[in-house]
Image (cartoon, helix red, strand yellow):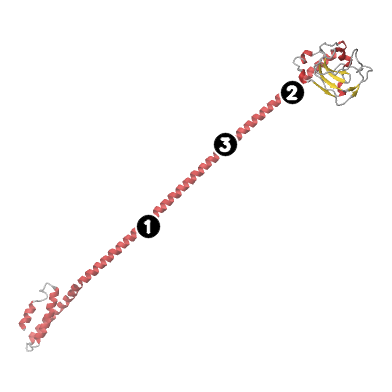
Amino acid sequence: MTKSVAKLAEFSPRRLANPLLAAVAATVLIATGAAAAAPDAALSRADQQRQLYQQQQQQPKLQNQQPQFRSQQQWPQNQQRAVQKQQKFQAEQQRLQNQQQLQNQQQRYLTQQRIQSDRQRLLQQQRALAQQQLQNQQRFLTQQQLRNQQQLQNQQRFLTQQQLQNQQWLQAQRYQQQQWQARQQRIQTQALVRNFDWNTYRPYQRPPLWAQYRQNFDPRRYEWARYAQQRYALRYAQPPGWSYQRWTYGQVLPSPYWSQPYWLSNYQQYGLEPLPYGYVWVQNGPDALAVDTVTGVILRALYGLFTSSNVGFANPGWQPPAY
């Protein structure tokens, strides 16, 4: 029995390479030693002490090898647990990385959105500024056109006023000149008429200034024949061989009928109008005729102007005609 134990002791846990086998050998050794102790009670005390010492020496080794054995048994679980932790760590790292990437993408998207919004706002501001500038330019151009039109209108108005003033001044000068000429001609005519001896006048004789007033004279503008609206009482002395006849314009009145005693020099008293130069109003019974003092051609005829009798001359207070 002791030899068996000794042989088993040779297989010390130190000599075994496998920790699991070493632990099993140690357990078997302990059990064998205990079994051998009972029949060998007669062993000497020294042997017992030696065995006890050996057991004490081996006991720590077994105790040291038991955790290693437990650790070897738990190694797959630890390995699996480590793999799970590694997977969890990697998953957590992947989740954090994905989360970080998502945050980065979101941040990048927000940054791009902000940049795009800023660009749009800048474009809108630029567009609004350009539109405002265009409106200002259009307003300035419109105001400039209005000012130019106003200036042009003012210039045209000034020129028109200047032309009107010049025309008015010219008309006034012309009118004054005409008035002065007419006054001079009237003075000359009055002087000639005063100097002309009407007592020596004979029919078909041209009075003074005949060529001046009758050079371009058109009698058709003054010809008419009408009835009088009002009647005057005036005596009429019939010339020799006279008989009443209703004369009209364009006819030639015989010279005895329009001699100086039958002239109406005060024709204004009977509502008669002034005649052109060289014509006189003549009474022909109840009628008044405008007769040319040179040719005897009748220019106008006003019928029924007088209620006359056959006593006396037509106008005893005869005077030369006034022109």
Q: In the rendered view, would you say 28 is above or below 288?
A: below
Q: In the rendered view, would you say 65 is above or below 160?
A: below
- Most extreme residue toward the left is 3
* Nearer to me, 170 or 23: 170
**Residue under label 2:** 175
Residue located 26% across and 68% down the image: 84
Residue located 48% across and 43% down the image: 130
* Nearer to me, 63 or 224: 224
Q: Which mark is residue 106?
A: 1
**Residue under label 3:** 145
Work out how far the residue at label 3 is from the one at label 2, CA to CA, in angstroms.
43 Å
Q: Amino acid at mark 3?
A: Gln
Residue located 60% across and 32% down the image: 152
> Which comes sooner in the sequence, label 3 or label 2?
3
Q: Amino acid at mark 1?
A: Gln
Q: Percent x, y for residue 153?
A: 62, 33
- Most extreme residue toward the bottom is 42
Work out how far the residue at label 1 is from the one at label 3, CA to CA, in angstroms.
56 Å
* Nearer to me, 122 or 40: 122
Q: Residues within 10 Å of mark 2 (few under 14, many from 20)?
A: few
Q: In the rendered view, would you say 62 is above or below 249?
A: below
